[in-house]
Image: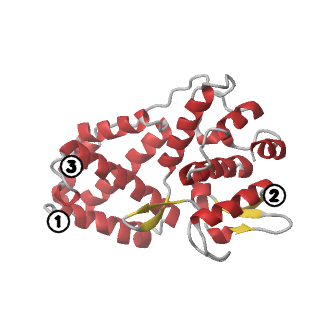
């Protein structure tokens, strides 16, 4: 890997995530992960647009037009306007911090500030999915493949628990308790914790999932339930990945079922029907 060109840029990024957010602002792990996800995605976009390696990125090569392009690409990949605005807020927060610590970066902060938040449009969106649509959606993943098996179980968990996407992604193996009444502990915004029951059918899917993705792990493991592997290490899935999954399977399901909405976002999977029958039929 080449040497870092702009040490000020990467030094401020390091301090922002290692000192400012956790120590000075006392942000939660969830908040820090959200900020990091936004910055990582933005830097990946910069790399692709500028045809450079990560260490070659500098403050000078990033301007408001590049940031706007990144935000537009999020919407094009299926992210909502609220997600777009949240990513913008995270990146602005870093530039605000940089300007306060290193005065020479004020000019870059001022330029980034030119990118406005986007006002949400309020179209006539379907806010639920009926049982027929849910069945069609869950029938799409090829469960003979590891990815297909994971994707189906992920959607089942969204449906069965009525959890938000980030709550699902924050689940660790120790949060799921099997037994006479299987449950999962969800960690919500503001450090709110709640325990919800899951169906026996979902619990059985979980046991099968463990055999493929967590073989040998015990029930007290702190490993994330859903993960991806990068550079040989496990990392939790990001919310944009879950959205891409539901969008893709939604598009496929709509070809055979007219009840599937135009855009299947994760919120639509939140427990709207007779779960027991639905899962039984899809097992």
Proximity of marks 2 and 1: CB atoms separated by less than 8 Å = no
2 or 1: mark nearer the eye: 2
Quarter occupied by residue 17: bottom left
Q: Earlier in the sequence, mark 3 or mark 2?
A: 3
Q: Is there a contact, CB below 8 Å, between mark 3 and mark 1?
A: no
Ranked by sequence position, the earlier of labels 2 and 1 is: 1
Q: Where residue 55 appears, x then y in whole percent?
A: 19, 60
| Residue indicated by mark 2 | 200
- Report the residue marked by disc 1: 7
In the figure, 259 relative to 30: above or below? above
Residue shown at the point (47%, 42%) measured from the top left: 83
Image marks 3 and 2: residues in contact by CB distance under 8 Å: no
Which label's residue is closer to the chain start, 3 or 1?
1
Q: Classify 10 Å Cα crowding around label 1: few (below 14), some (14-19), many (20 and above).
A: some
* Comparing labels 3 and 1, the label whose residue is closer to the camera: 1
Q: Which residue is mark 3?
A: 108
Residue at image coords 46%, 56%: 34
- On screen, residue 282 above or below 231: above
The answer to whether residue 199 is above or below residue 16 is: above
Q: How much space separates mark 3 and mark 1, taking CA atoms?
A: 16 Å
**Label 3 packing within 10 angstroms: few (<14), some (14-19), many (20+):** some
Secondary-structure class at tag 2 = helix
């Amino acid at each position: 890997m080449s040497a870092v060109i702009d040490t000020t840029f990467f030094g401020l990024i390091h301090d922002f995530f290692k000192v400012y957010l956790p120590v000075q602002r006392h942000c939660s792990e969830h908040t820090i992960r959200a900020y990091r996800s936004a910055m990582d995605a933005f830097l990946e976009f910069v790399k692709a647009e500028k045809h450079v390696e990560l260490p070659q990125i500098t403050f000078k090569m990033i301007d408001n037009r590049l940031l706007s392009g990144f935000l537009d690409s999020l919407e094009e990949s299926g992210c909502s306007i609220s997600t777009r605005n949240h990513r913008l807020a995270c990146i602005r927060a870093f530039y605000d911090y940089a300007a306060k610590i290193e005065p020479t970066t004020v000019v870059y902060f001022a330029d980034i500030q030119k990118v406005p938040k986007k006002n949400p449009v309020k179209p006539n969106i379907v806010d639920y999915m009926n049982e027929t649509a849910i069945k069609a959606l869950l029938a799409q993943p090829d469960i003979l493949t590891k990815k297909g098996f994971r994707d189906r179980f992920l959607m089942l968990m969204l449906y069965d628990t009525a959890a938000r996407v980030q709550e699902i992604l924050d689940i660790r193996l120790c949060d799921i308790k099997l037994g006479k009444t299987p449950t999962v502990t969800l960690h919500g915004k503001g450090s709110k914790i709640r325990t919800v029951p899951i169906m026996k059918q979902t619990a059985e899917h979980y046991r099968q999932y463990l055999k493929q993705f967590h073989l040998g792990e015990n029930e007290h493991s702190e490993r994330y339930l859903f993960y991806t592997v990068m550079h040989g290490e496990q990392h939790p899935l990001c919310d944009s990945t879950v959205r891409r999954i539901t969008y893709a399977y939604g598009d496929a399901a709509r070809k055979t079922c007219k009840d599937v909405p135009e855009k299947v976002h994760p919120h639509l999977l939140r427990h709207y029907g007779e779960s027991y029958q639905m899962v039984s039929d899809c097992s």
